[in-house]
Amino acid sequence: NAGVTQTPKFQVLKTGQSMTLQCAQDMNHNSMYWYRQDPGMGLRLIYYSASEGTTDKGEVPNGYNVSRLNKREFSLRLESAAPSQTSVYFCASRSSGMANEKLFFGSGTQLSVL
Amino acid sequence: GIQVEQSPPDLILQEGANSTLRCNFSDSVNNLQWFHQNPWGQLINLFYIPSGTKQNGRLSATTVATERYSLLYISSSQTTDSGVYFCAASLTGTASKLTFGTGTRLQVTL
């Protein structure tokens, strides 16, 4: 049981380049999330998908797009990377059922934009 | 949106000591969770505890929803407890949007 899988684990981009971070979960969860973590600021929600076919903005959506490809997969795209997007990105998922509301995280992607 | 504040921001303990971490939130919540981020960056879910008390080994958590706070207790701390502890909460009626506090960084020394 792999849980939440993110790829890649590390990435270096030049300003203006684009890339997509991939996330997949095998727990049959309805809800999926993308967070970024910056030093001293905790985790901030970028986008989330409450269920397949829906996406919504979180706290810091500017400069990002997302796609909920199917129930398992939720990708995050940077169209034109900026140095301010240097961060560690975490994907997460949860069931959204009343009996099981725990949030499970992937191992993170460390992104540097030069 | 909801505000989540954690205290203390940093904590240094000797192995074997006990500690209490606090999480205050600004509004009524329907979801409150505690996480541990280990020194390698991995985030582990410790508790889902929107109200009441739960225990898991040396860790326990209590949420008093009416007074808008949650406490995480670590007893007989070990060096493997080191890392950052986060709480996260979502408002009643907004089940999808968990907001994280800025964390408590714990260092357990020998």
Image (spheres, coloured by chain):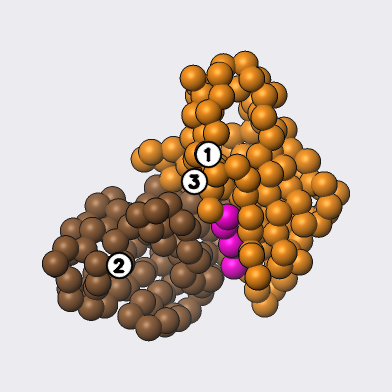
Location of residue B5 in the rendering, given as x and y in whole percent from the top left corner = 39, 51
Query: Which residue shows up at 41% across the image and 62% down it?
Result: B36
Q: Which chain is orange?
A: A
- Of the chain colours in the picture, the one used for chain B is brown
Q: Which mark is residue A10?
A: 1
Query: Which amino acid type corresponds to the residue marked 3 in the rendered image?
Result: Leu
Query: Which residue shows up at 42% across the image and 82% down it?
Result: B55
Query: In the figure, is residue A2 to the left or right of A40?
Result: right
Q: Which mark is residue A43?
A: 3
Label 2 marks a residue whose chain is B
Q: Nearer the viewer, residue A22 or A40?
A: A22
Residue A105 shown in magenta: yes
Query: In the figure, is residue A101 to the left or right of A86?
Result: right
Location of residue A104 in the rendering, given as x and y in whole percent from the top left corner = 59, 62
Q: Which residue is mark 2?
A: B80
Mark 1 lies on a secondary structure that is strand
- Stretch in magenta: A102-106
Marks 1 and 3 share the same chain: yes
Residue B85 shown in magenta: no
Local packing at callout 3 (Cα closer than 10 Å; few below 14, some 14-19, many 20+) is many
Q: Nearer the viewer, residue B44 or A7?
A: A7
Local packing at callout 1 (Cα closer than 10 Å; few below 14, some 14-19, many 20+) is few
Front of the two marks 1 and 2: 1
Marks 1 and 2 share the same chain: no
Query: In the figure, is residue A4 to the left or right of A75?
Result: left
Rounded to the nearest angstrom, the CA distance separating label 1 from label 2 is 25 Å
Query: Which amino acid type corresponds to the residue marked 2 in the rendered image?
Result: Thr
Q: How many numbered callouts?
A: 3
Label 1 marks a residue whose chain is A
Mark 3 lies on a secondary structure that is strand
